Amino acid sequence: GNSVTQMEGPVTLSEEAFLTINCTYTATGYPSLFWYVQYPGEGLQLLLKATKADDKGSNKGFEATYRKETTSFHLEKGSVQVSDSAVYFCALSVPRWDRGSTLGRLYFGRGTQLTVWP
Amino acid sequence: SQTIHQWPATLVQPVGSPLSLECTVEGTSNPNLYWYRQAAGRGLQLLFYSVGIGQISSEVPQNLSASRPQDRQFILSSKKLLLSDSGFYLCAWSVGNPPLGYTFGSGTRLTVV
């Protein structure tokens, strides 16, 4: 089946520290991989994505590389800021044909709470 | 531009009362629509998805139902709420073959008391 295993939180860092949030997956077929971020009281926003092996997604200083050999998509940032405090979700999507449409439901990890202190 | 509207933002309802959450999409046609729920301390769970008007699929058995009366309107309902229905409900849409991305609404925080 399809599933995402994500590093348990919470993660607490000082400003300018290096961040890694681990994410591994199992999937049938060829998934696309995503990182979503949820700021307090808000919905989910797409942070970055990668659609095939060895692709690197990047945005706002965050990066993640699609590693098929290790089935991983770890999120990294070299220097975190207080404004990065949020919950981060790793997710995958495997297209599925359903009544004439390609459905791509998302499978989410449990989320990792990141708190950055000044 | 493509946007998704979800309301209300917060809702407190007594046990046994009905529920109706609405989600509308603008700037796209024939999207795939999804309802997700995020329970406290847990990840997101897909509740329903829809590939077209009147076409609803349920991922998990539950006390909720969904309807899609128009192409860009997706409604989550319940006749009688349970305490376990409390959570953060997110509507989302995807377009493309395969899906090029997903856009989420801002969510509704439902507390059943």
Image: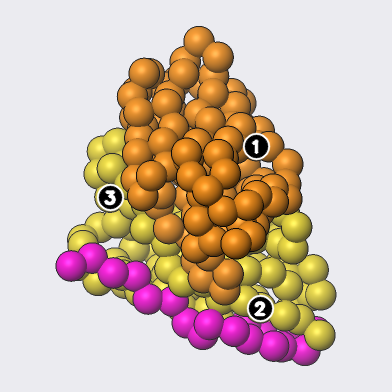
Instruction: Mark 2 and mark 3 in contact? Answer it, CB < 8 Å.
Output: no
| The N terminus of chain B lies in quadrant | bottom left
Mark 2 → mark 3, Cα distance in angstroms:
27 Å
The chain coloured yellow is: B
Q: Which residue is mark 1?
A: A6
On residue B95, the disc is 3
**Mark 1 crowdedness (10 Å alpha carbons): few <14, some 14-19, many ≥20:** many
Residue B16 - label: none
In percent of width and height, residue B27 lies at 19, 67
Question: Which residue is identified by label 2?
Answer: B110
Q: Label 3 marks which chain's residue?
A: B
Q: Is residue B63 above or below residue A100?
A: below
Type of amino acid at the residue the image marks with label 2:
Leu
Percent x, y of residue A89: 56, 47
Mark 2, chain letter?
Answer: B
Image position, residue A117 (x, y; %): 64, 60
Would you call the spot at circle 3 few (<14 residues within 10 Å), some (14-19), or many (20 or more)?
many
Quadrant of the drawing holding the C terminus of chain B: bottom right
The amino acid type found where label 1 is placed reads Gln
Q: Secondary structure at mark 1?
A: strand
Q: Chain of mark 1?
A: A
From mark 3 to mark 1, how far is it between C-alphas? 26 Å
Instruction: Work out whether residue B5 or residue B82 is closer to the camera in this orientation and state it.
Output: B5
The tint chain A carries is: orange
